[in-house]
Image (tube, helix red, strand yellow):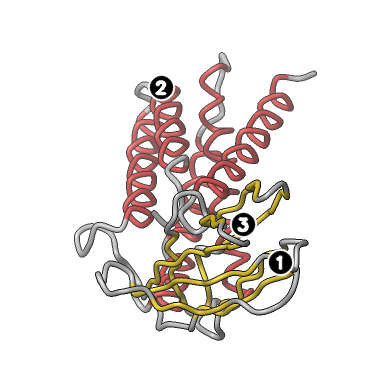
Amino acid sequence: MKRTILFWILAIVITLISAFYQRVTGPSYPLSGKINFDGKEISYKLERSQETVKNYLIEIETGDEAISGILFWRKFNSGNDFTTVPMTGSKKLSAELPVQKRLEKLDYYVQLSKDDKTIILPKEKIITIRFKDPVPIWILIPHIFAMFFAMMLSTRTGLEFFNKEPKLDKLALWTIVILFIGGFPLGFAMNGLAFGEVWGGWPFGNDVTDNKTQVAFIAWLIAFYFIKKKKNAKLAALLAAIILLAVYLIPHSV
């Protein structure tokens, strides 16, 4: 297998692994698990992100009509008493969290009871859900594609470090162009539509997602300077690729 093809395969694999890792470790990823209650295994999936278009319907499949449930919720960090909502249904319990404005959050948990026994879902007791406005699919998909395509290009460019005669100029330039498109114009649109804030990173704020995009972009601009000057070009590209991979491994929407 030619080294060039191998490098492209490695870049794709690394990108796919990092995309999966970022997805499942982010604070907006649903919290799911299984818990044993009175001899029955109950699975649950509790959302941590919800659009501001409807209430969030919580459903727990118990398989036991003798099990009842109560949903507890309150405003995030309010210190108020929890509002209680009896869950309805038999064998499949359900209740709704009231929809909130964008950026607002609710703390909630579910209590299941049978006879004199009770359990709490999730095991951590409290889960936080954040509300956001919907983003059109024609912005969401290009943004996601551009960000991970940029990562693939970045990784592929960094792997040129292991070539005796590296071809860096075009790869680095395309990395910068795609990263800029995905992180800035499309990123601005995503933030503005979902949260009402176009840019929350430095120097206007401390949003981690915006700041890590900025760090990765600056790292590649610096690398491109060294590539054009033919000074430590391979090392500069490798370091920029490592920096971008590192910041991508920070969970999204922290």
Q: Given the current orientation, which residue lies at the most extreme left position? A: 203
Q: Rounded to the nearest whole Å, what is the CA distance between mark 2 and mark 1?
A: 65 Å
In this view, 26 is above or below 136:
above
Give the left or right position of residue 19, taking residue 182 as reference.
Answer: right
Closer to viewer: mark 1 or mark 3: 1
Q: Dot 3: within a 10 Å radius of its alpha carbon, few (fewer than 14), some, or many (20 or more) residues?
A: few
Give the residue at x 43% y 69%. 130
Contact, mark 2 vs mark 1 (Cβ under 8 Å): no
Disc number for residue 66:
1
Residue pointed to by mark 3: 145
Residue pointed to by mark 2: 235
Q: Dot 2: within a 10 Å radius of its alpha carbon, few (fewer than 14), some, or many (20 or more) residues?
A: some
Indicate the position of residue 181 as horizontal and vertical percent values.
49, 61
The residue type indicated by label 1 comes to Ala
**Quadrant location of the N terminus?**
top right
Secondary structure found at label 3: helix
Q: Rounded to the nearest whole Å, what is the CA distance between mark 2 and mark 3?
A: 27 Å
Give the left or right position of residue 97, taking residue 211 as reference.
Answer: right
